[in-house]
Amino acid sequence: MNVSLKQWRAFLAVAQTQSFAEAASLVHMSQPALSIAMKNLEAELGGQLFARSTRAVALTPEGAELLPQVQRLLADWDNVMADAHQRFSLKRGRLAIAAMPSFASTALPAVLQAFRSRFSEISITVQEVIAEQLLEQVQEGRIELGVSFDPGNQPDVAFTPLFSDHFVAVFPAGHALAQAGTGPLDWAQLCSYPFVGLQRPSSLRALIDRHLSAQALSLNVVLEANQLATVGRMVATGLGVSAVPKLCEPQMHELGLSCRALVAPDIERQVGVLTHGRRPLSKAASAMIDELKRHYAER
Amino acid sequence: MNVSLKQWRAFLAVAQTQSFAEAASLVHMSQPALSIAMKNLEAELGGQLFARSTRAVALTPEGAELLPQVQRLLADWDNVMADAHQRFSLKRGRLAIAAMPSFASTALPAVLQAFRSRFSEISITVQEVIAEQLLEQVQEGRIELGVSFDPGNQPDVAFTPLFSDHFVAVFPAGHALAQAGTGPLDWAQLCSYPFVGLQRPSSLRALIDRHLSAQALSLNVVLEANQLATVGRMVATGLGVSAVPKLCEPQMHELGLSCRALVAPDIERQVGVLTHGRRPLSKAASAMIDELKRHYAER
DNA sequence: CGATCTTACGGGATTCGTAAACATA
DNA sequence: TATGTTTACGAATCCCGTAAGATCG
């Protein structure tokens, strides 16, 4: 036999109203039912909570000492219930997400704004991290949701594609490539210029090398950097040309650089959502993924 | 439909064991029953607490956020239950008592010692107050139990007699009354000596005056004080003789005074326990009253 | 005598446990 | 195929509500 929250709520009602009859209506029970409930509660506790005279009900000193404790704990339970409801209805919650810098600084803000306008009570933390760290964070469960390139088959990580990104050539505004038009460019054409590339080991760099060597092409790499922004500045300085994901085109434009799509081969890379493969998603994370999908479905 | 503590305990068990089967044995239920219970709990909360794959159970992020809260609250409930049990079994509690000074300094310590040896975990506060204040404190409920003279019919106060106190004459060791023997003395004999009495209004003084005037006796009051100890010192100084409750005889002896019982009339006053007439007694207070009764029943 | 709590008892709902079905590694 | 969860269903339990009883002012 165990005491129930209902019994304690009834106890509270009796203590407050000083009457079994009134208390019974407060907790939506019949008088006798409440009487039995209190009797059982007292039996469970091993002593009287109330001193009953047929005309009046009074708390015993022990009951009086218990009252504030019970009051507080019942209120705490209500808070827990409310908290749970809020979390499940997305009226409350936390969401930790991460995105690679190129995405965080381009498409993400609009998505976040849309999400926040729907679920204003969910607090979001965004981390800008490179793909490798992002993968690690997702695997460890430190962040629930990441936006990055498809990492391939990684343990404990699930990838949901959002869109596919292609490469663009990057060069200074006055470069020869700029004067040759604005249409697609072949990688072969890029190979004849000094090339500023990402440092190995970089998944991006490896991807490019793999595709080009399959076509018997090879870049004339004269410089390497490990941040895309640095590569951009090198190109702006006139040290060479480069190739970056189309997603980063806005950043390149900001540096005063020009871009043209690259084909032959059209190197494609999936960008999407990384989540932990075995842990369940929070409703907040699911809603964010929906928002991301909606954002790219609309195009 | 309401959630029960049992459901939350089951939730805790599942979260800790990561298994419905193990958790079921922990909470003494069958697997299916626990499964249903969790299903109902989730329905009540409006979302999933666990992500079930047929081979494994994992907390959802929402469930994980709830877990520590639930853990804390369940522990709190256990504490409340334990607290209640302890209070009812006199392994814990507070007891505020008051006693008139003559009693507090004579019989009370032995009673308190006996009580504490039985119920060592009950903390007791003792107030030494005069009869009028004591009555007031009991009426207000500030103290639960007082030891004093019978106050007569007072609103909201119940009196339980413990013993009846008689009066003794008090005089210096070398006094004529001391040389006249050690047996009972008549009040009439006391009237021929200068008398040191309690100041009016004092219930003790009023009692004496009432009884003596009924016998056409009158004291030769030469001095008055409002504390019994002061009266004793005046007598010790040789300013006169006095009459005090037998209960105070030890105090008088300490001042080097002698005493003899007073009769004709044998003025008797009930000493007993004052409690609030309408409020219920705590188990601790009841036990203390029992201890007091036992103390005087043994004689 | 009236108001109020308690006891008695029948009905109903919830919950439990056993057995079977189901789903994944 | 084996392990572990869910569904199905019969049964027991618990709890509630109505009606009668008891008690005190």
Image (spheres, coloured by chain):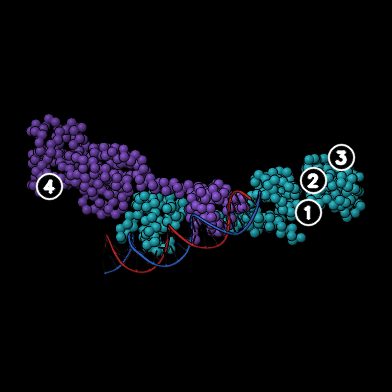
Chain colours: A cyan, B purple, C blue, D red
| Cα distance between the residues tagged 4 and 2 | 113 Å
Q: Which mark is residue B211?
A: 4
Residue B70's x, y, as percent? 52, 50
Chain that bears disc 2: A
| Cα distance between the residues tagged 3 and 4 | 124 Å
Mark 3 Cα-neighbour bin, 10 Å: few <14, some 14–19, many ≥20:
few
Say whether residue A236 is visible.
no
Sequence-wise, which precedes: disc 3 or disc 2?
2
Front: mark 3 or 4: 3
| Cα distance between the residues tagged 3 and 1 | 29 Å
Is residue A189 found left or right of A8 in the rendered image?
right
Q: Which mark is residue A222?
A: 3
The reply to whether label 3 and label 2 mark residues of one chain is: yes
Quadrant position of residue A136: top right
Foreground residue among B176 and A235: A235
Say whether residue A115 is visible.
yes
Q: Which mark is residue A204?
A: 2
Quadrant position of residue C9: bottom left
Front: mark 3 or 1: 1
Sequence-wise, which precedes: disc 2 or disc 1?
1
Element assignment for label 2? helix
Kindly identify which residue carries mark 1: A164
| Cα distance between the residues tagged 4 and 1 | 112 Å
